[in-house]
Amino acid sequence: MSSTSVRPQPTPTKVTCAVCELHAEAVFRVEGMDCHEEVVILERRLKPLVGVEAMTADVIGQRLHVQYDAAKLTTADMVDAVGQTGMRMWLEHEEPRTSGPDVRARFWLTVGAGVALMAGVGLPHAAIREQVADALDLVVHQARLADGTRRVVAVAEVVRVAGGPATRELFGWRAGRPRWRAALSDALAERLAA
């Protein structure tokens, strides 16, 4: 009678580099993640990225915890991917961008409107229109489609006409097709090129 001994198979060891082991998790703050549907949109956008291993969302705290392979993926790649959904994301230990002309313009517009409201002064619509026109160059309208994806459906340039500020449509999504209506003005094209 022969005895057959069963040798235990060695368990495969997981090979990881020191960098991945140290930086394989990140917690992000997500502005615009207000409901479960937006979590699903984030999952659809992030899960296909090479290197994403797992993610959990805290809708109330607007936080996203992502486990990933840092050798294959960077946090900047994830931030860019989420930016394409219309939401804004940044690492929790960092702060969102707080400088630049657009940020300053929004700040002063908010301060001006707040002071006027506290003083009980109702700003005339023309004054509000002027302030908004001074702060914006382009207006981009993004809509959520029936399948949950978002699409830019219109782009308009803020222009000055005899009656004050107005918008001029540059792009529109009509009957399921993109339609370019006009080119950028020379002044705006110069500012964007700089």
Image: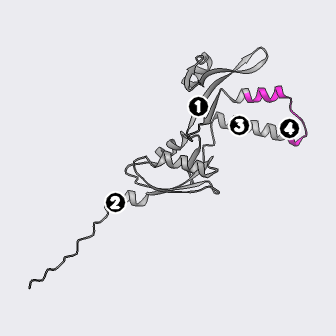
- In the rendered image, residue 57, in percent from the top left (x then y), is placed at 56, 56
Magenta stretch?
A: 116-132
Q: Name the residue carrying label 2.
A: 16
Give the class, few, some or many, for how many residues have Cα within 10 Å of label 2's Cα (few <14, many ≥20): few
Residue 125 in magenta? yes
Q: Disc number at residue 106?
A: 3
Relative horizontal placement of residue 62, taking residue 164 as reference (left or right) = left
Residue 79: image location, x then y, percent: 52, 45
- Whole-angstrom CA distance, mark 1 to mark 3, is 22 Å
Of the image marks 4 and 1, the number of the one nearer the N terminus: 4
Frontmost residue, 24 versus 172: 172
Residue 79 as seen in the image, left or right of residue 18: right
Q: Which residue is mark 1?
A: 152
Q: Position of residue 69 (x, y in %)?
A: 40, 54
Visible residue check, residue 62:
yes
Q: Of the residues shown, which amino acid type is indicated by label 3?
A: Arg
> What is the quadrant of the C terminus in the image?
top right
Q: Which residue is mark 4?
A: 116
Q: Mark 2: which amino acid?
A: Thr
Q: What kind of element bears circle 2?
A: loop
The Cα atoms of the two marked residues, 2 and 4, are separated by 58 Å
Measured in 3D between alpha carbons, the distance from the residue under mark 3 to the one under mark 2, in whole angstroms, is 45 Å
